[in-house]
Amino acid sequence: MMAADDCYIGLMSGTSLDGVDGVLVYLPPGRDGAMQVLASSYIPFDPAIRQLALQLQQPSEDEIHHEALLANRLAQVYAACIRDLQGQAPDVRVIAAGVHGQTIRHRPELGYTWQVNNPALLAELTGIDVIADFRSRDIAAGGQGAPLVPAFHHAIFAVPEEVRVVANIGGISNISILDPSGTVSGFDTGPGNVLMDYWNHLHCGTHYDANGTWAAQGEVLTALLENMMAEPYLQLPPPKSTGRDLFHAQWLQQHLQVFEGLSAVDVQATLCAYTANTLAQAILAHAAQAGAVYVCGGGAFNNTLMCMLQNALRQRASAATVASTAQLGVAPEHVESLAFAWLAQQFCSRQAGNLPAVTGAQGGRILGALYPA
């Protein structure tokens, strides 16, 4: 029986900068019973929000002013998403909304991460409690502040029969390694869609390569792929996390300038292979016995990428099968927003939301800050 007091909203806008995904979900207390997604919503960002967020990825003039404007605009979009969710389930009382915000800088090695958000305005606009700023407490405790989703992945996807890997392919890719013993590990493996999206927009004018159709028309450039695979981040031991601070347009252009006469479509195919190979390399190095890799995030809808990931694992003698989290009953586009609803519940029940083995924090910490309605 669903209890009215166990419903939460989760909102996620990720590195891909495409828009905000939201869910309204029943989360049973004490993990007794199954979660139920009661409503879902997606609101795309308008070009002005996307451009402003990209501008703030790098030092620029009057940053504080522009960040404040972006925070206010994001709060309006987040509020519209929440209203849509509540409109689909008008009789449900929401305990709180977990809102990740929009990452513009992630520098845990310098002791900070920054997600643009105006949770005070969001609470004012929606009349519900807002939990925000999930990452900074983990960093204060010596952690990376990311990834935070492995704890949620363990809660809903772990089984006692096999080692499972959950690969979240958003702008950046991360993996959660779920061992039957109950231990969990995970880290950011490298770029997900961020480089492919940039290159596709530069040459095709669209924000992403739908289903990897353009990449499928090209040939993987072995020399370029090997050049990019030499990126030092890939060899760092976990805990580790990354973002646009490393994998950005200038990073790609530095690798491309070593070569001459490259076809744009071949570069796109190689970037797709790069995401697949960085994931496969990480999986084989840290979860060689995995029986299955379940993919969530936008990458789950890129058939070319999914096939390249399966082939990259097979070439490394892995028996793991690659599938979408939809096969486990959870839509791949909902997993991250569900995670932040779950993190909101963890905050409200005063339970740790991080995994020190994943982030490197000194211990479990209650993550987030409350902005009451």
Image (cartoon, grey):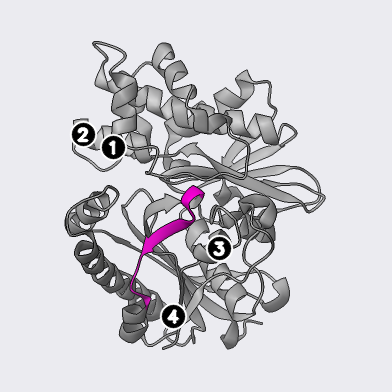
Which marked residue is nearer to the observer: mark 1 or mark 3? 3
Q: Residue furthest front?
A: 110
Q: Nearer the viewer, residue 277 or 1?
A: 277
Q: CA distance from mark 2 to mark 1?
A: 6 Å
Is residue 112 one of those drawn in magenta? yes
Q: Amino acid at mark 2?
A: Leu
Q: Residue at x 77, y 43 (%)?
A: 162
Look at discs 4 and 1 and give the one toward the viewer.
1
Q: Is residue 145 visible?
A: yes
Residue 18 % position (x, y): 31, 52
Question: Which mark, by number, is residue 70?
Answer: none
Sequence-earlier tag: 4 or 1: 4
> In front: mark 3 or mark 2?
3
Mark 1 neighbour class, 10 Å CA radius: few under 14, some 14 to 19, many 20 or more: many
Q: Earlier in the sequence, mark 1 or mark 3?
A: 3
Q: Secondary structure at mark 2?
A: helix
- Which residue does the numbered mark 1 point to in the structure image? 198
Magenta residues span 109-119
Location of mark 4 (residue): 89
